[in-house]
Image: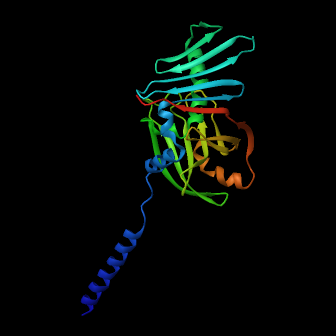
Amino acid sequence: MRSLVSAVLGGILLLVAGCQSSSSPAPPQASSIIDRALATHGSDVLDHATMRFTFRGASFRLDHRRDGRFHYRRSLTDSLGRSVVEGLTNDGPYRVVNGDTTTLGTEERAEVETAVNSVAYFARLPAPLDAPAVQPSYRGRDTIDGTPYHRVRVTFQQEGGGRDWQDVFLYWFHTETSAMDYLAYAYGLGPDEETGTRFRKADNVRRRGGVRIADYDNYTADTLSPDQMHRYPALLARDALTYVSRVALDSVEVRPHPAP
């Protein structure tokens, strides 16, 4: 009889444990969170559109075609009063000064690519998170200013990940609306580079051509290492961050290309 009772109790415990296990929700997939954010932001429009804006005195034009071709360019007047156009296409970077195309050395090519592509990347977010080189992972939930967010970490494959493929990003997506309201990133993770981190808070959110556009307040915490960026929301709540800059896109236009 005692062995029978033990067997019955053991079966009940196993059944209860099984029910508890099956009732525990699995963590959401990072890729699914990103997909919902892309839809919320209208990012698919940017896959076949021209985006124009001004940023810190330079005019930008970002073109994406349905066949996968892209062309980013910025136009400015340099310190010598010359008209300069710097661009990046599928074929690489280029520079035109007073109408003449210049020959770029290795360092100059890197400078142009970084200057143009970094602005284009942040201006189009979260659209770039749909790239094949993106490696997202779900890192839990955070509450920021009383609002719940999913936290997603993004790294990049070396192949197709660009010049700064070693950079690491954290994105916070609203659990209900899927909007990307905060992000953090670590830069300079390659050899012989100065490492740092930044935290950005979205502001002045608006729609242009069906695409969600935002400006950002840019912060940092000098003591925060790249693997500690998840602490940024807590430091923001304590007013313990250092303000760095305002990242604002002015005169934004988004014009979708007509379907073929």
Q: Residue furthest top?
A: 100
Identify the image quadrant of the C terminus: top left
Instruction: Name the one closer to the observer, 254 or 164.
Output: 254
- Kindly identify the residue that appears in the image at 59 percent across and 19 percent down: 112
Instruction: Name the one closer to the observer, 194 or 43.
Output: 43
Residue 175's x, y, as percent? 54, 57
Quadrant of res 50: top right
Horizontally, residue 92 falls left or right of residue 52, namely left
- Kindly identify the residue that appears in the image at 63 percent across and 51 percent down: 231
Quadrant of res 110: top right
Residue 139's x, y, as percent? 51, 52
- Kindly identify the residue that appears in the image at 74 percent across and 50 percent down: 240
Horizontally, residue 232 falls left or right of residue 240, namely left
Image mark count: 0
Identify the image quadrant of the N terminus: bottom left
Compared with residue 123, is residue 75 higher up or lower down, i.e. above or below? Answer: above
Compared with residue 55, is residue 246 higher up or lower down, i.e. above or below? Answer: below
Residue 18's x, y, as percent? 34, 73
Compared with residue 202, is residue 248 higher up or lower down, i.e. above or below? Answer: above
Color theme of the render: rainbow
Quadrant of res 28: bottom left
Horizontally, residue 171 falls left or right of residue 9, namely right
Q: Residue furthest bottom?
A: 1
Horizontally, residue 53 falls left or right of residue 167, namely right
